Image: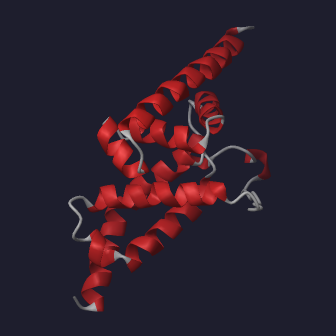
Amino acid sequence: MRDSDRSAEFVAFTRGHRADLVRTAALLCAGDEALGEDVVQTTLTRLYLAWHRVRRAESPLAYARTTLTHVFFDEVRRAHRRRETTVADPALAGEPAFARDPDVDLRAVVLAALESLGPRQRAVVVLRHWHDLDVAETARILHCSTGTVKSQNARALAHLRDVLGAAHLTAEVP
């Protein structure tokens, strides 16, 4: 395959799926858009370098999501990572850009609840409930057993019920 053909295929794939990858990364990063963009950029770099394997995969998007999830885990494992947060409008500091709509409060509560999960539980919740993947596909992406997916999902949902239930009760108090 010529480099120009490879590049054209990769560009077409990126145009078609980047928005999905960014949304997934933003959820994995609990609304941290800057970290999500970093994760997507690293993912796209890895995909480009391995494009000969990606294009032969049964589902290049599934391959990309697997890579994205692994990049996310790599990023959160880097405890020494120091990050700066920048925003265009200081009045919007701490608020993700996609949260500026009528459901801002709900989004903030859900993202805070997601952030309270560990990285693996957050990945399980995003893959199972955002992307509606089955247990086996989630296990394949995370390189773990189906039992691990089930237990991580159960623990994560119980935690989210506690957190979101408490936030809901707090929100209703006048």
Residue at x-position 60% and y-position 41%: 100
Position above or below: 129 against 141:
above
Q: Is residue 130 left or right of residue 40?
A: left
Point out residue 9 in the picture as x, y percentages from the top left corner. 27, 76
Q: Nearer the viewer, residue 9 or 88?
A: 9
**On-image quarter of the N terminus:** bottom left
Point out residue 144 in the picture as x, y percentages from the top left corner. 42, 45
Q: How is the image coloured?
A: secondary structure
In the rendered image, which quarter is residue 81 located in?
Answer: bottom right
Can residue 19 be seen?
no
In the rendered image, which quarter is residue 31 located in?
Answer: top right
Can residue 48 be seen?
yes
Point out residue 162 in the picture as x, y percentages from the top left corner. 62, 18
Q: Nearer the viewer, residue 75 or 22?
A: 75
**On-image quarter of the C terminus:** top right
Residue at x-position 37% and y-position 43%: 138
Q: Is residue 124 left or right of residue 73?
A: left
